Image (cartoon, grey):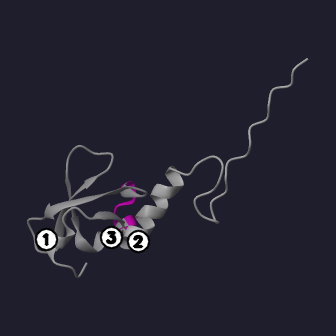
Amino acid sequence: MAQRESELIGARFKMSPLGLRRSPSFAGKEGVIIGRGRYSRSVRVRFDSNKTSTTLHRDYIELITPSAELAGFSQRCAGADRPAHPSIRAPAPRLKAQQD
């Protein structure tokens, strides 16, 4: 996190490998950086599923690149007729109910 603090506010993040080892309860969570912490190496963050903010050491988080964030968005919004990316499989076609 070598960027200026003001540029980081509002940036999306996920837990880094070190953060996952130190705080396994945050595994799989993502959120937004909302400000600086009380100490020089800490940041205030808000996880997507939380209403309150949390203070974390800067080494415990890593920024989500815009391309990775957009890839996740396209996976969630992919139409049923075609995949959003070659590595994403389209859902199986629905079978019509057999009529007697």
Mark 2 neighbour density, 10 Å: few (under 14) some (14–19) many (20 or more):
some
Residue 6: mark in rendering: 1
* Residue depicted at 87% across the width and 20% down the height: 99
Amino acid at circle 1 = Ser
Q: Residue furthest left?
A: 38
Between 95 and 33, the residue placed more toward the observer is 95
Cβ–Cβ under 8 Å for marks 3 and 2: no
Callout 2 amino acid: Pro
Is residue 35 part of the magenta span, yes or no?
no
Badge nearest the viewer, 1 or 3: 1
Residue at 74% x, 43% y is 93
Q: Position of residue 10 (x, y in %)?
A: 22, 61
- Residue 5 falls in image quadrant: bottom left
| Vertical placement of residue 68 versus 79, above or below | below
- Circle 3 is placed at which residue position? 63
Q: Nearer the viewer, mark 2 or mark 1?
A: 1
Q: Which x, y percent locates residue 2? A: 23, 82
Q: Are marks 2 and 1 in contact (CB under 8 Å)?
A: no
**Sequence order check, earlier mark of 1 and 3:** 1
* Image quarter of residue 39: bottom left
What is the magenta segment's predominant secondary structure?
A: helix
Read off the magenta span.
20-25
- The residue located at (37%, 71%) in the rendering is 65
Q: Amino acid at mark 3?
A: Leu
Give the CA separation, mark 1 to mark 3: 14 Å
3 or 2: mark nearer the eye: 3
Q: Quadrant of the N terminus?
A: bottom left
Is 46 left or right of 63, judged from the image as shown? left
Residue that carries the numbered disc 2 in the rendered image: 17
Measure the alpha-carbon separation of dots 2 and 1. 24 Å
**Is 81 displayed left or right of 93 in the figure?**
left
